[in-house]
Image (spheres, rainbow, N blue to C red):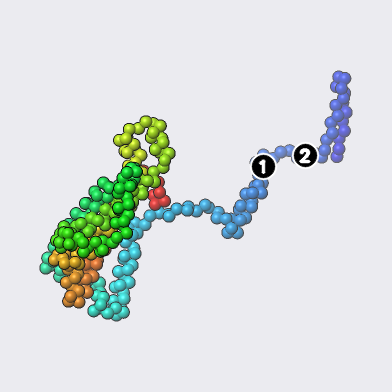
Amino acid sequence: MNLDLTSRTGGGTATVTGGPEKAPPSSAPPTSTPPADATTADTAAAAGLVPAIQRRLGRGRSIPFGRLLGPLLLVLAWWGASAAGWLDPRKLSSPASVVTSAQELWVSGRLQESVQTSLSRALLGLLIGVAAGLALASGLSRIGDAVVDGTLQVKRSIPNLALLPLLILWLGIGETMKVVVIALGVTVSIYINTHAALVSIDARYVELAEAQRLSRWLFLRKVVLPAALPGFFTGLRLAVTAAWLGLIVVEQINATSGIGYMMFQAQQYAQSGIILVGLVLYGTFGFASDALVRLVEGRVLSWRRTITA
């Protein structure tokens, strides 16, 4: 009901108008009504339109020894096809035959000698090529770009196979020619990637170094070196691959030792098991060297925050 009470206080009049009587407040906490936006979001999440929990957009957790999964599946498929009789053993030996051939080569001592010769050639060519590629890197100098970059770009377009006749004419068919061929491929890979990293340095870093009045040595150590290392390691991974590719080429041209020579001799007698042993060795060494470069890169560049971290 409505109340209309009038009371006189001093010289004024106070009027109180009341509405319906209200119940005393409850001791229970008030129930809050969710806003319309939250209700809409929950409804959309329940309908599958919006994920209820935000998923991470990165690559997820790393898989231990995940890079071995692909080669392992390939070997299992090869083994299964051989066991099922789908492969002609005269053209492609079974994994068991390859293991037997490797054991025979090991017992005779040919395997150790061939591996040692090939590794020494690849390592020497890699070291010479890396040193030459870094020495020729000219991203910080206009004169260096004018003198060196054009020449290296021309060399990049000429495969090493095209240079072999000239190198044999100059150096003969001995070890020097083989190491030079490997080093040429490594040099180009190191130079191209290191040069690209140097010319990609943000100009703001250079301006900041100038504003801080850094010396040339501090500029190289604080700005240039961290900026060039990612490109260098990319080039190093490609250089390792180039070293093995060059090794395969030179060991099949008038060679008298090495894994490639062992494979060439096996070809003459249709020994596919020995040929596959050589291929497995090349693949294993290439995979292991790339993994080693990755490991060193991860340690040296641990300050980077990338999608693989």
- Name which residue lies at 64% across and 52% down: 40
Earlier-in-chain disc, 1 versus 2:
2
Q: Looking at the image, how many numbered discs can be counted on the residues?
A: 2
Q: Is residue 140 left or right of residue 131?
A: right
Per the rendering, the mark at residue 220 is none
Q: Foreground: 300 or 58?
A: 300
Q: Which numbered mark, 1 or 2, is in the foreground of this view?
A: 1
For disc 1, the neighbor class at 10 Å (few under 14, some 14 to 19, many from 20) is few
Q: Position of residue 259 (x, y in %)?
A: 19, 65
For disc 2, the neighbor class at 10 Å (few under 14, some 14 to 19, many from 20) is few
Q: Is residue 258 visible?
A: yes
Q: Is residue 302 visible?
A: no
Q: Position of residue 264 (x, y in %)?
A: 19, 70
Q: Are marks 1 and 2 in contact (CB under 8 Å)?
A: no
Residue labelled with disc 1: 30
Query: What kind of element bears circle 2?
Result: loop
Residue labelled with disc 2: 22
Quarter holding residue 144: top left
Up the image or down, 6 lies above or below 102; here it is above
Quarter holding residue 256: bottom left
Q: Position of residue 229 (x, y in %)?
A: 33, 46
